[in-house]
Image (cartoon, rainbow, N blue to C red):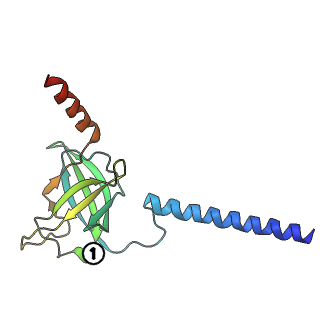
């Protein structure tokens, strides 16, 4: 009887540990954090097509996470997607004005994220600045449709 009680308590503890691990992984995968974020500054970029980019998508520089997409809006004047990013404050005054931003996909069917490539201009990108050199998302469905229409039209 005492041995069975110990087994039940051990199984219950193991299940609780597994549940806590699942909650931790859910927070990591979703990009949500329980900790206080570092100081950040905002910059914006305009894209012709953002694909599946979403708020809270990551922003990387040389493959390292340096920020998040805070919001996405439609620019009423040019009908482009205005993407507002919050970047780590350590980058303030270190990125040049001609920094490029490209929407990339993590793997073949993974989430979209923004990859920054620093430029060489002497003028620095400031808080509230605009990244003008952008590359829109590569949409797999559009590529397939283009390939199909080109191959059927070539005959």
Residue drawn at (22%, 51%) of the image: 82
Residue nearer the viewer, 53 or 145: 145
Residue drawn at (46%, 59%) of the image: 29
- Where is mark 1, residue-wise? 89
Quadrant containing the C terminus is top left
Task: Locate residue 136, reporting x and y percent.
Answer: 20, 49
Q: How many marks?
A: 1
Quadrant containing the N terminus is bottom right
Residue 9 relative to residue 33: left or right: right
Task: Locate residue 26, reporting x and y percent.
Answer: 51, 59
* Residue, far left: 122
Quadrant of residue 117 within the rendered picture: bottom left
Task: Locate residue 52, reporting x and y percent.
Answer: 32, 46
Residue drawn at (20%, 33%) of the image: 146
In the rendered image, the vertical position of residue 96 relative to residue 49, given as above or below? below
Residue drawn at (37%, 58%) of the image: 56
In the rendered image, the vertical position of residue 101 relative to residue 125, given as above or below? above
Assign a secondary structure to mark 1. Answer: helix
Quadrant of residue 144 within the rendered picture: top left
Residue nearer the viewer, 79 or 16: 16
Task: Locate residue 84, reporting x and y percent.
Answer: 26, 58
């Amino acid at each position: 009887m005492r041995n069975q009680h110990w087994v039940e308590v051990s199984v219950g503890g193991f299940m609780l540990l597994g549940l806590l691990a699942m909650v931790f992984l859910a927070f990591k995968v979703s990009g949500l954090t329980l900790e206080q974020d570092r100081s950040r500054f905002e910059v914006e970029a305009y894209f012709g097509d953002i694909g599946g980019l979403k708020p809270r998508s990551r922003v990387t520089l040389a493959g390292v996470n340096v920020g998040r997409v805070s919001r996405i809006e439609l620019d009423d004047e040019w009908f482009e997607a205005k993407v507002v990013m919050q970047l780590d404050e350590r980058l303030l005054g270190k990125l040049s004005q001609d920094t490029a931003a490209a929407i990339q996909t993590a793997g073949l069917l993974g989430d979209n994220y923004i990859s920054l490539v620093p430029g060489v201009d002497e003028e620095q990108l400031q808080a509230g600045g605009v990244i003008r050199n952008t590359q829109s998302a590569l949409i797999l469905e559009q590529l397939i449709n283009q390939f199909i229409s080109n191959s059927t039209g070539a005959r």
